[in-house]
Image: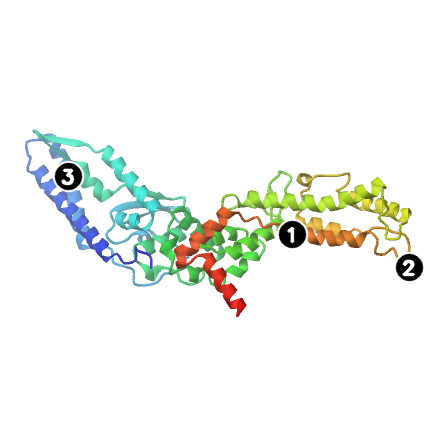
Amino acid sequence: MAPFINMSSSFDTLASYVTDDELQSEELLNRVTNSESNEFLQEMRQPAMKVAENSRTKKSTGTPLKQTKPSPFSLSTSEDFTFPESNMSIRVTGPNGTVIHGRVCSQVMSLFSPVWRQLVQNISDNYSKTQRNLRVGNELFQLDDAVNHHEGGCLDFTADNHVALQILLNIAHLNTRAVARRELEYKDLLNMAELIHKYDCLSRVEIFHKGWLAGQEFQAYRDGMENWLFIAWVFGRRQVFEDLAEKLVMEISISCLGTPVTATGSPLKGSFPDGIIESILQVRLYTIQRLLDIWYGYIGELLKGDSILCKHGEAMCDNLAHGSLSKAMSNFDLYPVKIASEISISINELRENLVTIRVNVLPSHSLLFDHSKCHWVQIEKMIEVVILDTPNPTLEVHRQQMNGALIALTGTDAEYFEEEEQDEFEY
Protein backbone atom coordinates (compact mmCIF):
# COMPACT_ATOMS: atom_id res chain seq x y z
CA MET A 1 0.00 0.00 0.00
CA ALA A 2 1.22 3.45 -0.81
CA PRO A 3 2.91 5.14 2.17
CA PHE A 4 0.65 8.17 2.13
CA ILE A 5 -2.42 6.14 3.09
CA ASN A 6 -1.23 5.57 6.69
CA MET A 7 -0.83 9.21 7.60
CA SER A 8 -2.68 9.68 10.87
CA SER A 9 0.51 10.85 12.53
CA SER A 10 1.16 13.26 9.68
CA PHE A 11 -2.30 14.71 10.03
CA ASP A 12 -1.85 15.06 13.79
CA THR A 13 1.35 16.97 13.13
CA LEU A 14 -0.48 19.08 10.56
CA ALA A 15 -3.18 19.95 13.06
CA SER A 16 -0.54 21.08 15.53
CA TYR A 17 1.03 23.25 12.87
CA VAL A 18 -2.22 25.00 12.17
CA THR A 19 -2.96 25.49 15.86
CA ASP A 20 0.49 26.93 16.58
CA ASP A 21 0.20 29.38 13.73
CA GLU A 22 -3.22 30.49 14.88
CA LEU A 23 -1.82 31.16 18.34
CA GLN A 24 1.09 33.08 16.83
CA SER A 25 -1.42 35.10 14.81
CA GLU A 26 -3.39 36.03 17.92
CA GLU A 27 -0.22 36.79 19.89
CA LEU A 28 0.92 39.07 17.10
CA LEU A 29 -2.47 40.76 17.08
CA ASN A 30 -2.16 41.51 20.80
CA ARG A 31 1.28 43.00 20.28
CA VAL A 32 -0.02 45.22 17.50
CA THR A 33 -3.14 46.41 19.34
CA ASN A 34 -1.21 47.17 22.52
CA SER A 35 1.05 49.62 20.69
CA GLU A 36 -1.38 52.53 20.71
CA SER A 37 1.25 55.18 20.05
CA ASN A 38 2.21 54.02 16.57
CA GLU A 39 -0.10 55.41 13.84
CA PHE A 40 1.09 52.91 11.25
CA LEU A 41 0.28 50.06 13.60
CA GLN A 42 -3.17 51.51 14.08
CA GLU A 43 -3.76 51.30 10.33
CA MET A 44 -2.63 47.67 10.34
CA ARG A 45 -4.83 46.74 13.30
CA GLN A 46 -8.01 45.94 11.41
CA PRO A 47 -6.49 43.46 8.88
CA ALA A 48 -4.60 41.73 11.68
CA MET A 49 -7.74 41.43 13.78
CA LYS A 50 -9.55 39.95 10.82
CA VAL A 51 -6.83 37.31 10.35
CA ALA A 52 -7.02 36.20 13.98
CA GLU A 53 -10.83 36.14 13.88
CA ASN A 54 -10.77 34.03 10.71
CA SER A 55 -8.34 31.67 12.40
CA ARG A 56 -10.67 31.15 15.35
CA THR A 57 -13.60 30.65 13.01
CA LYS A 58 -11.74 28.03 10.98
CA LYS A 59 -10.77 26.20 14.12
CA SER A 60 -14.34 25.81 15.28
CA THR A 61 -16.05 25.30 11.93
CA GLY A 62 -13.72 23.10 9.89
CA THR A 63 -15.09 21.68 6.66
CA PRO A 64 -16.55 18.21 7.40
CA LEU A 65 -15.68 15.17 5.30
CA LYS A 66 -18.21 14.41 2.60
CA GLN A 67 -20.46 11.52 3.60
CA THR A 68 -22.03 10.87 0.21
CA LYS A 69 -20.48 9.59 -2.98
CA PRO A 70 -21.20 12.15 -5.71
CA SER A 71 -20.72 11.30 -9.32
CA PRO A 72 -17.32 12.40 -10.62
CA PHE A 73 -19.09 13.63 -13.72
CA SER A 74 -21.45 16.04 -11.98
CA LEU A 75 -20.98 19.79 -12.12
CA SER A 76 -18.25 20.88 -9.73
CA THR A 77 -18.47 23.75 -7.28
CA SER A 78 -16.01 25.42 -4.93
CA GLU A 79 -17.32 23.15 -2.18
CA ASP A 80 -16.04 20.13 -4.11
CA PHE A 81 -12.53 21.59 -4.04
CA THR A 82 -12.47 22.66 -0.38
CA PHE A 83 -10.95 20.22 2.11
CA PRO A 84 -10.41 20.01 5.89
CA GLU A 85 -7.40 21.70 7.49
CA SER A 86 -6.88 23.71 4.31
CA ASN A 87 -4.35 26.51 4.31
CA MET A 88 -3.76 27.15 0.61
CA SER A 89 -6.01 28.42 -2.16
CA ILE A 90 -6.42 26.79 -5.55
CA ARG A 91 -8.00 27.83 -8.82
CA VAL A 92 -9.72 25.32 -11.10
CA THR A 93 -11.49 25.69 -14.43
CA GLY A 94 -15.04 24.42 -14.04
CA PRO A 95 -17.17 22.54 -16.59
CA ASN A 96 -18.50 25.77 -18.11
CA GLY A 97 -15.13 27.46 -18.29
CA THR A 98 -15.71 29.44 -15.12
CA VAL A 99 -12.96 29.64 -12.51
CA ILE A 100 -13.68 27.76 -9.29
CA HIS A 101 -11.84 28.70 -6.10
CA GLY A 102 -11.06 26.04 -3.51
CA ARG A 103 -8.87 25.35 -0.51
CA VAL A 104 -6.43 22.49 0.07
CA CYS A 105 -3.99 21.37 2.73
CA SER A 106 -0.46 22.19 1.61
CA GLN A 107 1.10 19.42 3.72
CA VAL A 108 -1.21 16.81 2.19
CA MET A 109 -0.45 18.10 -1.29
CA SER A 110 3.28 17.84 -0.59
CA LEU A 111 2.95 14.24 0.61
CA PHE A 112 0.82 13.16 -2.33
CA SER A 113 2.90 14.37 -5.28
CA PRO A 114 6.53 15.46 -5.68
CA VAL A 115 5.37 17.93 -8.31
CA TRP A 116 2.80 19.43 -5.96
CA ARG A 117 5.46 19.53 -3.25
CA GLN A 118 7.64 21.68 -5.49
CA LEU A 119 4.74 23.96 -6.38
CA VAL A 120 3.93 24.46 -2.70
CA GLN A 121 7.58 25.10 -1.94
CA ASN A 122 7.82 27.66 -4.74
CA ILE A 123 4.88 29.58 -3.30
CA SER A 124 6.42 29.44 0.15
CA ASP A 125 9.76 30.71 -1.17
CA ASN A 126 8.10 33.55 -3.07
CA TYR A 127 6.28 34.71 0.04
CA SER A 128 9.49 34.58 2.05
CA LYS A 129 11.19 36.86 -0.46
CA THR A 130 8.36 39.42 -0.36
CA GLN A 131 7.81 39.61 3.37
CA ARG A 132 7.46 43.13 4.73
CA ASN A 133 9.38 43.94 7.86
CA LEU A 134 7.62 45.98 10.47
CA ARG A 135 9.76 47.82 13.01
CA VAL A 136 8.39 48.84 16.41
CA GLY A 137 11.07 50.80 18.19
CA ASN A 138 14.12 48.54 18.12
CA GLU A 139 12.02 45.35 17.80
CA LEU A 140 11.64 43.68 14.40
CA PHE A 141 8.84 41.32 13.59
CA GLN A 142 7.11 40.19 10.42
CA LEU A 143 3.40 40.67 9.98
CA ASP A 144 3.17 38.81 6.68
CA ASP A 145 4.25 35.52 8.27
CA ALA A 146 0.95 35.34 10.12
CA VAL A 147 -1.16 36.58 7.23
CA ASN A 148 0.49 34.60 4.46
CA HIS A 149 0.44 31.30 6.27
CA HIS A 150 -3.33 31.44 6.32
CA GLU A 151 -3.66 32.74 2.80
CA GLY A 152 -0.92 30.34 1.67
CA GLY A 153 -0.65 31.65 -1.87
CA CYS A 154 -2.63 30.09 -4.71
CA LEU A 155 -2.02 26.95 -6.75
CA ASP A 156 -3.19 27.38 -10.33
CA PHE A 157 -4.86 24.24 -11.76
CA THR A 158 -6.88 26.06 -14.42
CA ALA A 159 -5.10 24.13 -17.20
CA ASP A 160 -6.16 20.74 -15.75
CA ASN A 161 -9.35 18.78 -16.26
CA HIS A 162 -11.54 19.50 -13.23
CA VAL A 163 -13.04 15.98 -12.98
CA ALA A 164 -9.66 14.23 -12.91
CA LEU A 165 -8.22 16.85 -10.55
CA GLN A 166 -11.14 16.48 -8.15
CA ILE A 167 -10.55 12.71 -8.01
CA LEU A 168 -6.85 13.16 -7.23
CA LEU A 169 -7.53 15.79 -4.57
CA ASN A 170 -10.11 13.55 -2.90
CA ILE A 171 -7.62 10.69 -2.82
CA ALA A 172 -4.91 12.98 -1.47
CA HIS A 173 -7.14 14.26 1.34
CA LEU A 174 -8.36 10.70 2.13
CA ASN A 175 -11.91 11.52 1.06
CA THR A 176 -12.09 8.14 -0.70
CA ARG A 177 -15.89 7.86 -0.50
CA ALA A 178 -16.08 10.54 -3.15
CA VAL A 179 -13.69 8.69 -5.49
CA ALA A 180 -15.07 6.75 -8.45
CA ARG A 181 -14.20 3.04 -8.31
CA ARG A 182 -16.10 1.90 -11.38
CA GLU A 183 -14.77 2.01 -14.91
CA LEU A 184 -14.18 5.45 -16.39
CA GLU A 185 -15.17 6.47 -19.88
CA TYR A 186 -12.43 6.88 -22.46
CA LYS A 187 -12.08 10.67 -22.16
CA ASP A 188 -12.19 10.62 -18.36
CA LEU A 189 -9.64 7.82 -18.26
CA LEU A 190 -7.37 9.78 -20.59
CA ASN A 191 -7.71 12.89 -18.40
CA MET A 192 -6.80 10.81 -15.35
CA ALA A 193 -3.76 9.34 -17.10
CA GLU A 194 -2.60 12.82 -18.13
CA LEU A 195 -2.78 14.24 -14.60
CA ILE A 196 -1.28 11.14 -12.98
CA HIS A 197 1.69 11.41 -15.31
CA LYS A 198 1.91 15.19 -14.99
CA TYR A 199 1.96 15.08 -11.19
CA ASP A 200 3.91 11.81 -10.84
CA CYS A 201 1.44 10.15 -8.49
CA LEU A 202 0.74 6.74 -10.08
CA SER A 203 1.36 4.73 -6.91
CA ARG A 204 -1.26 6.83 -5.11
CA VAL A 205 -4.07 5.39 -7.26
CA GLU A 206 -3.07 1.77 -6.67
CA ILE A 207 -6.38 0.70 -5.15
CA PHE A 208 -8.52 2.50 -7.74
CA HIS A 209 -6.91 1.89 -11.15
CA LYS A 210 -8.28 -1.62 -11.73
CA GLY A 211 -11.83 -0.39 -11.37
CA TRP A 212 -11.16 2.53 -13.70
CA LEU A 213 -9.72 0.26 -16.40
CA ALA A 214 -12.21 -2.60 -16.04
CA GLY A 215 -13.93 -3.35 -19.32
CA GLN A 216 -12.12 -0.55 -21.12
CA GLU A 217 -8.98 -2.20 -22.51
CA PHE A 218 -10.80 -4.02 -25.31
CA GLN A 219 -11.97 -0.64 -26.61
CA ALA A 220 -8.38 0.44 -27.20
CA TYR A 221 -8.47 -1.21 -30.63
CA ARG A 222 -11.54 0.63 -31.86
CA ASP A 223 -11.16 3.47 -34.33
CA GLY A 224 -10.86 6.84 -32.65
CA MET A 225 -9.20 5.42 -29.52
CA GLU A 226 -5.62 6.24 -30.51
CA ASN A 227 -4.87 8.02 -27.22
CA TRP A 228 -5.18 4.67 -25.51
CA LEU A 229 -1.47 4.51 -26.30
CA PHE A 230 -0.95 7.09 -23.58
CA ILE A 231 -3.34 5.39 -21.15
CA ALA A 232 -1.62 2.02 -21.61
CA TRP A 233 1.79 3.65 -21.22
CA VAL A 234 0.87 5.39 -17.95
CA PHE A 235 -0.80 2.34 -16.38
CA GLY A 236 1.77 -0.20 -17.58
CA ARG A 237 -0.46 -2.10 -20.05
CA ARG A 238 2.37 -3.26 -22.30
CA GLN A 239 0.42 -5.72 -24.47
CA VAL A 240 -2.26 -3.15 -25.24
CA PHE A 241 0.42 -0.57 -26.01
CA GLU A 242 2.36 -2.78 -28.42
CA ASP A 243 -0.76 -4.09 -30.20
CA LEU A 244 -2.18 -0.60 -30.66
CA ALA A 245 1.17 0.74 -31.88
CA GLU A 246 1.28 -1.99 -34.55
CA LYS A 247 -2.31 -1.18 -35.54
CA LEU A 248 -1.43 2.48 -36.02
CA VAL A 249 1.58 1.58 -38.18
CA MET A 250 -0.83 -0.12 -40.58
CA GLU A 251 -3.60 2.50 -40.46
CA ILE A 252 -1.92 5.89 -40.46
CA SER A 253 -1.91 7.92 -43.67
CA ILE A 254 -0.38 11.31 -44.38
CA SER A 255 -2.41 14.44 -45.13
CA CYS A 256 -1.60 17.01 -47.80
CA LEU A 257 -0.04 19.07 -45.01
CA GLY A 258 2.32 16.23 -44.15
CA THR A 259 0.64 15.39 -40.85
CA PRO A 260 -0.46 11.88 -39.75
CA VAL A 261 -4.13 10.98 -40.13
CA THR A 262 -6.04 8.13 -38.45
CA ALA A 263 -8.20 5.47 -40.10
CA THR A 264 -11.27 7.66 -39.53
CA GLY A 265 -9.67 10.56 -41.40
CA SER A 266 -9.06 12.61 -38.27
CA PRO A 267 -5.71 14.21 -37.44
CA LEU A 268 -3.62 12.22 -34.99
CA LYS A 269 -3.69 14.46 -31.93
CA GLY A 270 -3.85 14.36 -28.17
CA SER A 271 -1.45 12.92 -25.62
CA PHE A 272 1.14 10.35 -26.67
CA PRO A 273 4.32 9.10 -25.03
CA ASP A 274 7.46 10.84 -26.24
CA GLY A 275 8.93 9.22 -29.31
CA ILE A 276 6.15 6.75 -30.13
CA ILE A 277 4.58 8.68 -33.02
CA GLU A 278 8.00 9.27 -34.59
CA SER A 279 8.76 5.56 -34.23
CA ILE A 280 5.40 4.58 -35.76
CA LEU A 281 6.05 6.83 -38.76
CA GLN A 282 9.56 5.42 -39.21
CA VAL A 283 8.28 1.83 -39.18
CA ARG A 284 5.55 2.87 -41.61
CA LEU A 285 8.10 4.26 -44.08
CA TYR A 286 10.33 1.20 -43.69
CA THR A 287 7.45 -1.20 -44.39
CA ILE A 288 6.12 0.80 -47.34
CA GLN A 289 9.56 0.87 -48.92
CA ARG A 290 9.86 -2.91 -48.55
CA LEU A 291 6.49 -3.38 -50.26
CA LEU A 292 7.45 -1.06 -53.11
CA ASP A 293 10.80 -2.79 -53.52
CA ILE A 294 9.02 -6.06 -54.24
CA TRP A 295 7.26 -4.61 -57.27
CA TYR A 296 10.00 -2.31 -58.47
CA GLY A 297 12.53 -5.09 -58.06
CA TYR A 298 10.39 -7.47 -60.06
CA ILE A 299 9.82 -4.91 -62.81
CA GLY A 300 13.57 -4.31 -62.87
CA GLU A 301 14.26 -8.01 -63.32
CA LEU A 302 11.79 -8.18 -66.20
CA LEU A 303 13.39 -5.14 -67.84
CA LYS A 304 16.94 -6.45 -67.57
CA GLY A 305 16.15 -9.53 -69.60
CA ASP A 306 19.22 -11.37 -68.29
CA SER A 307 17.07 -14.34 -67.46
CA ILE A 308 13.54 -15.43 -68.24
CA LEU A 309 11.28 -15.49 -65.19
CA CYS A 310 8.48 -17.43 -66.84
CA LYS A 311 8.24 -20.94 -65.36
CA HIS A 312 8.27 -22.38 -68.86
CA GLY A 313 11.05 -20.19 -70.18
CA GLU A 314 8.99 -18.14 -72.63
CA ALA A 315 10.12 -14.52 -73.09
CA MET A 316 6.70 -13.47 -74.37
CA CYS A 317 5.20 -14.36 -70.98
CA ASP A 318 7.70 -12.01 -69.30
CA ASN A 319 6.88 -9.22 -71.75
CA LEU A 320 3.16 -9.51 -71.02
CA ALA A 321 3.85 -9.52 -67.29
CA HIS A 322 6.01 -6.38 -67.53
CA GLY A 323 3.42 -4.44 -69.52
CA SER A 324 0.47 -5.32 -67.31
CA LEU A 325 2.45 -4.77 -64.12
CA SER A 326 3.70 -1.32 -65.18
CA LYS A 327 0.21 -0.25 -66.21
CA ALA A 328 -1.38 -1.44 -62.95
CA MET A 329 1.26 0.31 -60.84
CA SER A 330 0.72 3.49 -62.84
CA ASN A 331 -3.04 3.30 -62.19
CA PHE A 332 -2.30 3.36 -58.45
CA ASP A 333 0.10 6.28 -58.89
CA LEU A 334 3.03 4.03 -58.01
CA TYR A 335 4.85 4.15 -61.34
CA PRO A 336 7.22 5.67 -62.42
CA VAL A 337 9.23 4.62 -59.39
CA LYS A 338 8.48 6.41 -56.08
CA ILE A 339 10.07 6.28 -52.66
CA ALA A 340 8.22 5.59 -49.42
CA SER A 341 8.13 9.24 -48.30
CA GLU A 342 6.10 10.07 -51.43
CA ILE A 343 3.35 7.62 -50.48
CA SER A 344 0.53 9.21 -48.49
CA ILE A 345 -1.87 6.27 -48.21
CA SER A 346 -1.77 3.82 -45.32
CA ILE A 347 0.00 0.47 -45.42
CA ASN A 348 -3.37 -1.28 -45.30
CA GLU A 349 -4.55 0.63 -48.37
CA LEU A 350 -1.26 0.11 -50.18
CA ARG A 351 -1.34 -3.62 -49.48
CA GLU A 352 -4.95 -3.82 -50.68
CA ASN A 353 -3.98 -2.08 -53.92
CA LEU A 354 -0.97 -4.27 -54.50
CA VAL A 355 -2.74 -7.58 -53.95
CA THR A 356 -5.46 -6.62 -56.44
CA ILE A 357 -2.91 -6.27 -59.24
CA ARG A 358 -3.21 -9.10 -61.74
CA VAL A 359 -0.28 -9.89 -63.97
CA ASN A 360 -1.12 -10.87 -67.55
CA VAL A 361 0.61 -14.01 -68.76
CA LEU A 362 0.44 -16.29 -71.80
CA PRO A 363 -2.64 -18.48 -72.15
CA SER A 364 -2.23 -22.04 -70.93
CA HIS A 365 -2.38 -24.49 -73.84
CA SER A 366 -2.12 -27.59 -71.68
CA LEU A 367 -1.29 -28.76 -68.17
CA LEU A 368 2.34 -28.99 -69.20
CA PHE A 369 2.38 -25.34 -70.22
CA ASP A 370 0.19 -23.74 -67.52
CA HIS A 371 1.23 -20.07 -67.13
CA SER A 372 -1.37 -19.24 -64.47
CA LYS A 373 1.22 -19.56 -61.72
CA CYS A 374 3.89 -17.49 -63.45
CA HIS A 375 4.97 -14.32 -61.67
CA TRP A 376 1.98 -13.53 -59.45
CA VAL A 377 2.24 -16.34 -56.88
CA GLN A 378 5.77 -15.38 -55.87
CA ILE A 379 4.86 -11.70 -55.53
CA GLU A 380 1.80 -12.37 -53.35
CA LYS A 381 3.84 -14.48 -50.95
CA MET A 382 6.51 -11.80 -50.66
CA ILE A 383 3.89 -9.18 -49.76
CA GLU A 384 2.55 -11.31 -46.91
CA VAL A 385 6.06 -11.95 -45.61
CA VAL A 386 6.72 -8.18 -45.44
CA ILE A 387 3.44 -7.52 -43.62
CA LEU A 388 4.03 -10.28 -41.07
CA ASP A 389 7.61 -9.13 -40.56
CA THR A 390 6.69 -5.51 -39.74
CA PRO A 391 8.69 -4.39 -36.67
CA ASN A 392 6.89 -3.22 -33.55
CA PRO A 393 7.49 0.53 -33.06
CA THR A 394 7.59 0.26 -29.25
CA LEU A 395 10.94 1.55 -28.03
CA GLU A 396 12.92 0.21 -25.09
CA VAL A 397 12.32 3.44 -23.17
CA HIS A 398 8.57 2.80 -23.44
CA ARG A 399 8.95 -0.76 -22.14
CA GLN A 400 11.04 0.44 -19.22
CA GLN A 401 8.47 3.05 -18.26
CA MET A 402 5.60 0.55 -18.44
CA ASN A 403 7.57 -1.93 -16.37
CA GLY A 404 8.12 0.82 -13.79
CA ALA A 405 4.39 1.61 -13.82
CA LEU A 406 3.57 -2.04 -13.21
CA ILE A 407 5.91 -2.12 -10.24
CA ALA A 408 4.35 1.07 -8.85
CA LEU A 409 0.84 -0.37 -9.09
CA THR A 410 1.43 -4.03 -8.21
CA GLY A 411 4.92 -4.33 -6.76
CA THR A 412 5.78 -6.80 -9.53
CA ASP A 413 7.49 -6.19 -12.86
CA ALA A 414 6.55 -7.45 -16.32
CA GLU A 415 9.28 -10.11 -16.37
CA TYR A 416 7.61 -11.85 -13.43
CA PHE A 417 4.32 -12.09 -15.31
CA GLU A 418 6.08 -13.39 -18.42
CA GLU A 419 7.75 -16.12 -16.35
CA GLU A 420 4.41 -17.03 -14.78
CA GLU A 421 2.80 -17.35 -18.20
CA GLN A 422 5.68 -19.49 -19.41
CA ASP A 423 5.40 -21.80 -16.37
CA GLU A 424 1.69 -22.26 -16.99
CA PHE A 425 2.36 -23.07 -20.64
CA GLU A 426 4.94 -25.70 -19.71
CA TYR A 427 2.46 -27.47 -17.46
Circle 2: residue type: Leu
Quadrant of the image occupied by residue 88: top left
Front position among marks 3 and 1? 1
Residue at horizontal 40 percent and vertical 59 percent from the top: 410
The residue indicated by pointer 2 is: 368
- Mark 3 vs mark 1: which is more N-terminal? 3
Element on which disc 1 rests: loop
Residue 238 got which mark? none
Is 35 rendered above or below residue 157?
above
Residue visible at 69% across and 53% down? 385
Camera-side residue of 151 and 17:
17
The three-letter amino acid code for the residue at tag 1 is: Asp
Image coordinates of residue 180 in percent, x first then y, are 39, 60
Q: Residue furthest right?
A: 365
Q: Residue at x 72, y 51 (%)?
A: 383
Would you name the residue on which mark 3 appears?
46
Amino acid type, label 3:
Gln
* Residue 220 image-quadrant placement: bottom right
Q: Quadrant of the N terminus?
A: bottom left
Identify which residue, 123 or 368, lies in the foreground.
368
Q: Position of residue 266 (x, y in %)?
A: 59, 47
Local secondary structure at mark 3? helix
Which of the two labelled residues, at mark 2 and mark 3, occupies the earlier sequence position?
Answer: 3
The alpha-carbon separation of the residues under discs 1 and 2 comes to 35 Å
Task: Please give the label number shown on residue 389.
Answer: 1
Question: Percent from the top left, x then y, of residue 93?
Answer: 39, 46
Structural crowding at the residue carrying mark 2, measured as other residues with C-alpha within 10 Å and reported as few (<14), some (14–19) or many (≥20): few
**How is the model colour-coded?**
rainbow
Could you tell me how far apart the alpha carbons at marks 3 and 1 are, in whole angstroms?
A: 77 Å
